[in-house]
Amino acid sequence: MNSITTFFLSRVIGQKAFDTDNKYIGTVKDLLVDPDSTLHSSGHPVVNGIKIRLKQQDAFYSFQNFRIEKTNGRIKIICSQLNELSADQISNSLYLVQTVLDNQIVDINGRKLVRVNDIRLVTIVNDTFAVAVDIGIEGLLRRIGIAKPLKFIGSLFNASIPAKFILWEDVETIDSSSSNIKLSKSYKKLQTLHPSDLADIIEDLGRKASAEVFSALDDERAADVMEELETETQVHILESISIEKGADVLDKMPADEVADILDALEDERAELLLNEMEKDTSQEVRELLVYPDHTVGSIMSSEVLSFNQNMTIEEVLIELRAQKPEMETLYNLFVIDENEILLATFSIRDVVISPPDVRINQIMKPSPVHLRDYQKINEVAEIVSKYNLLAIPVVDKKNVLKGMVVIDDVIEDLIRKRRTNK
Amino acid sequence: MFKNKKTLFSQIGVFLAILGPGIITGSVDNDAGGITTYSVAAAVYGYNLIWTLIPSFIVLVVIQEMNARMGIVTGKGLADLIRENAGVKVTFFIFIGLLIADIGNTTTEFAGVAGSMEVFGVSKYISVPIVGFLIWFMVVKGTYKIAERIFLLFSVSLLMYVVSALMGKPHWGEIGHAIIHPQLEINTHSISMIIGIIGTTIAPWMQFYMQSSVIEKGLKMKQYKYTLIDIVVGCVATVVVAFFIMVACASTLHAHGDQILEAKDAALALKPLAGEFASQVFAFGLFIASIFSATILPLATAFYVCEAFGFEAGIDKKWDEAKEFYILYTSILIIGAAIILIPNAPLIAISLWTQVINGMLLPVVLVCMILLVNNKKIMGKYVNKPINNIIGWGAVIVLIILSLVLLLMPIFTTGN
C-alpha cells in the first residue's frame, strides 16, 4: 500500500464502508474537517470525522480509525474501530458535503465567488487532508459520471477537458447552511482582500451569508466595506446585524455616507442606530439628514478643517498633527470668523511652502467659490470643473460654513445618475 | 427622510418603484409560442378551451408568489438553490432540458418575427438576421436595461388584441356558456392542446426569471404586499391578453372553419374576416412579443445555466471574464435564428417537441421549488402555507397525469 493516496470527495461519498472483517458498516454521507487550517503545519485542514448512514440512521465517527485504500482505481473504505464523535467535536467541524460541495466559496486570489464541483483529498501516512477544491468542468463531469468516457473520446482527438483547481489555502468557505449561530467563523483570509472586492463578493452572496460574513469583519474594515456596498445591500445588512454592531460600524464612517445609508433605511431602524451611535457623530448625521435628496447638503461632507485667520502656519501644523484628518479633508482648508462665517480658503500646498511664522491671513484667498446647502446638486459638477477644484465649501444662507463637497461625491452622484438612466 | 409614509400618494410611489418583476414576466409570457398556441387552440376548439385560462391563472399566481418569496428571503437564484440542495445530477438534468427547450423556444420566437414581418411583406431572410443581430448587439453592448423598458412600454400594445377581438364581433353569451359548459371531446389532440396552453402560460424558465428579477430589484419582505399586487397584475395581464387572442381567433377563424398552424396564419386569416387593420394589429403584437422574448429568453437561459454550474455570468461582465456565458448566449441566439432560415425547416415539429420538453420539465422544476420553499433551513418562518402546498402539489399531479396521458396515448391510438 502507498503511504500517499489522493482521491476525490465525490468518489468517497455514497460508497460503502467496511470493517476489518469485511462486514458492511454503512454508507459514507459526509466528511468533516477541522476548519481552522492554520493550526496544522501543512496549512491544510485535516479530516477528523465521517458521517455514516446505516439503515436510515446517521452517525458521526472519528476518522482516526478509517482508511481509504485505492487499488486499481477502485476506492475502498475500511474502518478498524468505530469511535463516535462528541457533539462538541461535530459542531466545531466543517461539513465538506453539506457546506462546501456545490456551494459558493471565495477564491482569494481571483477575488470572486466560485462554485465547488469537487474536493481533492490526500492521505499521508495516518492523516487525511483537504488539499484543493475543483471548480473546473472536469469536476462537473466526474460528478455526473461521464468524465472518464469523455476523457477517452477527447484523447482520441487530442483534446482535453479543462480542469481547474484552487489550493485550500487560497479559498475561504462560507457557511450559510446552518441555522445555529455557532462560534462565529473568523473569515481571516477575507480580511486580506481590498474593501471594494470584498464588497462585490458580499453583494453576490445570499442574504444570510452576506450578513454573516459582514458581521465577522472588524469594525474598521466593516466600515470600509460598507462604504463600497450598493444601497440595497447596505440596507439589508443593517437590518440583519445587531443594532450595536451596526452603530459601531457607522461610527467609523464619514457622516455624509452614514446620512445616505440611514436615508434609505426604515425610519424606526435609523432612529435606533442613531441613538446607539456616539453622540457627536450622530449629531452630525442628524444635521445632514435634514437636507432633501437633490440638494448639496445631502452629499456634502461635514468633516472640514477651519481655522482663525490670525493663526500661524506653525499652529496650523500642530493642529493638523493633533487631528490626523483623512486625506479628503485636506483637499481644502477654511478660514472662519468667531461666528463660523466663511471668510477665505487656503490649501495644504500654501501651508507646506510657507515659513512657520507666517499668519494665515497673509496666504489665504478671500471670497472663495462656495455652494449653498440647499442648492441643487446638478449645478455642482459644472462649478467643480470650471474652477478646477477638489473640494468646494458649503455655507448656509447666513454664510456659516456647514461642510464641503468633495470631487469624489460629485463623481459618485454623476455615475449614479447615469446608471439609473440606463 | 422621516416623512410620513402612510399617505396614499407615497404608497402608489412605493408600488411603482418595485413594480416590474411580475409584470415583465407576465408580458414575456405571451410570447410567439403562447400566441401561436392560443390562436391554434381557438381556431380548432372555438371558445371551448378558454376555461383552461382560469386554473392556469391560479397556478401561475401561486408559483410566482413562491418564486418571489424565495428570492426575497434567500437572495439567491432558483438555479443556485437547486444546485446547492439537489446536487449535480438533478441540476444537470433540469438544465440540459431547459437548454434544449429554450433553444426550441427561441426558434419559436424567431418564427414569430419571421411570420409577423411576412404579413407586412418582409422576407424572413431579411427580418430574422437583422433582428437577431440587433438583439445580440443590444445585449452585448449593455443597453439591455433601456431595451427592457422600451419593450415593457411596447408590451402595452399587446392590449391591441382586445381591439382585434372586438372587431371580430364575438358572441359574449356563447363565450360565457363555453367557459362554464365547455364541449370538448377527450382525445390526444385536445389533451395536447390543454398541456400546450398550460405549458406556454407556465413555462419552466419563467420561474428562474421571476426569482432573479425579484433579487435584482432588491425587494424586501416589508414590500411583500406590493410584490403580490405586482404578480397578480402581471398574471391578470397575461390571462386577459390570452383570453382576447382566443376570442379573436375563435369568433372568426373557428366560426368559418378555417384551420391554422402558426400565429402568422391567424393574422392572415383575420384579414378577410375582421378587416386589414385587425390583421395588422395582430401581426404587430406578434412581432413585439417575439422580439421581447427573443431578447430575454437566450439571455436568461445562458445566465441560469452558468449560475448553476458556477461560471461567471452577467451582461455587466466583459467577454474575457465570462466567456462561457457569452458563448452560450450567442450560440442559443444563432441556433434559434438559423433554424428559421433553413428552407422547409420542420417548425411545427420543433414547437411541438419544445412544448413536450417544457411540459415534462415543469413538474420537475415545480417539485424542486415546492421542496425548497418548504425547507425551514432555507426559508425560516417564510415556508409555504398549506394552501400553497395544496395548489402546488395539485398542479404537479395534474401536469404529470396530463403529460403521461399525452406521452402514452399515441401508443394506444394510431394515426394521430
Image: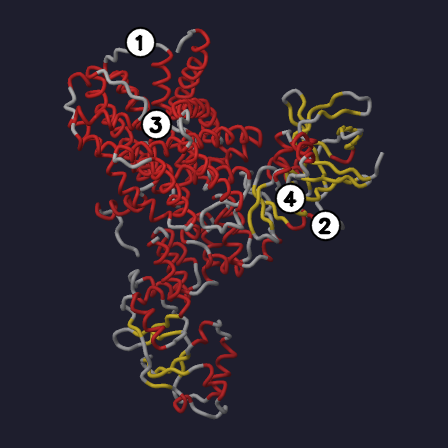
Does residue B224 show up?
no
- How many residues crowd around disc 3 within 10 Å: few (fewer than 14), some, or many (20 or more)? many
Q: Earlier in the sequence, mark 2 or mark 4?
A: 2
Same subunit, tags 2 and 4: yes
Give whichever of A171, B266 is nearer the camera. Answer: B266
Numbered disc 3: secondary structure: helix
Kind of residue sitting beneath label 2: Gly
Q: Residue under circle 1?
A: B185
Give whichever of A393, B235 is nearer the camera. Answer: B235
Kind of residue sitting beneath label 3: Thr
Vertical order, B236 against B137 (above or below): above
Q: Which mark is residue A43?
A: 2
- How many residues crowd around disc 4 within 10 Å: few (fewer than 14), some, or many (20 or more)? some
Q: Which mark is residue B201?
A: 3
Q: Residue under circle 4?
A: A164
Q: Position of residue A170 (x, y in %)?
A: 65, 50
Q: Position of residue B288 (x, y in %)?
A: 29, 38
Residue under mark 3: which chain is it in? Answer: B
- How many residues crowd around disc 1 within 10 Å: few (fewer than 14), some, or many (20 or more)? few
**Labels 2 and 4 touching (C-beta < 8 A):** no
Q: Nearer the viewer, mark 1 or mark 3?
A: 1
Which residue corresponds to the image point at 73% horizontal and 36% vertical from the top-left?
A: A7
Q: Position of residue B11 (x, y in %)?
A: 25, 45
Q: How far is the residue under mark 1 from the one under mark 3? A: 22 Å
A101 horizontally vs B243: left or right: right
Q: Quadrant of residue B131?
A: top left
Q: Earlier in the sequence, mark 1 or mark 3?
A: 1
